[in-house]
Image (cartoon, rainbow, N blue to C red):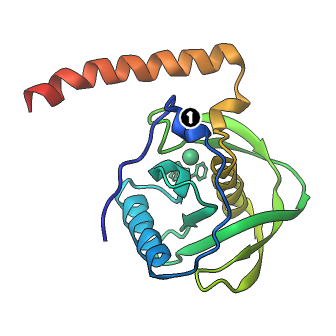
Amino acid sequence: MAIREIVEFPDPRLRTKAQPVVAFDAELRQLVADMFETMYDAPGIGLAATQVDVHRQLLVLDVSEEKNAPMVIINPRIVSREGSQVYQEGCLSVPGIFADVERADRIRVEAHDVDGKEVVIEADGLLAVCIQHEMDHLTGKLFVDYLSPLKRELVRKKLAKQRRHAEPAAAGA
Ligand code: K2U
Ligand code: ZN
């Protein structure tokens, strides 16, 4: 297993539309293992393949308190949405930024599992938020896209400033 680099906003690679997974093979299983290791190490509760610069429709998540409920969702399609909820979201690709985002409260998702078997997932609450957040990544969309253009520009400038202040330390390391 390996911890992979997480691509950060405003890197244009995050805007790539992911292609369907067609090969349910050993290479896919290796990618899934690496994504879980990367997600738990971050730490996060979800990760889309886009974020590790692999442009396939694949996401991993684990919203459990005990970090013992991993889920792999491949080629997801939301087939029904109900209700509405607002959650203060963050993103491993937009470090240190948090904002309220409104999403559906309950969703039904048709997908494949890691063996290529068709599955149906009913989700609500935080699981529904996480799945919608990760599925946005697969279409090149980020939670900051729900902010006003002015707020998004402020986010971009804040991240650029964070990186400028971080680089001297890295250089001196
Ligand atoms: O896509 C990602 O960057 C993973 C997110 C998933 C997520 C974002 C917002 C709301 C739910 C899930 C990261 O896990 S952000 C870190 C985090 C950790 C605990 C709870 C919420 C967010
Ligand atoms: Zn994210």
In the foreground, 43 or 12: 12
What x and y, as percent, mark residue 31? 44, 69
What x and y, as percent, mark residue 121? 76, 75
Q: Residue at x 54, y 32 (%)?
A: 12
Residue that label 1 marks? 98
**Residue 8, image quadrant:** top left
Q: Secondary structure at mark 1?
A: loop
**Residue 116, image quadrant:** bottom right
In the foreground, 89 or 61: 61
Q: Residue at x 60, y 86 (%)?
A: 115
Residue type for callout 1: Phe
Q: Residue at x 61, y 38 (%)?
A: 15
Pick the quarter of the image with the C terminus: top left
Q: Residue at x 50, y 49 (%)?
A: 51
- Looking at the picture, does residue 11 appear above or below residue 33? above
**Residue 108, image quadrant:** bottom right
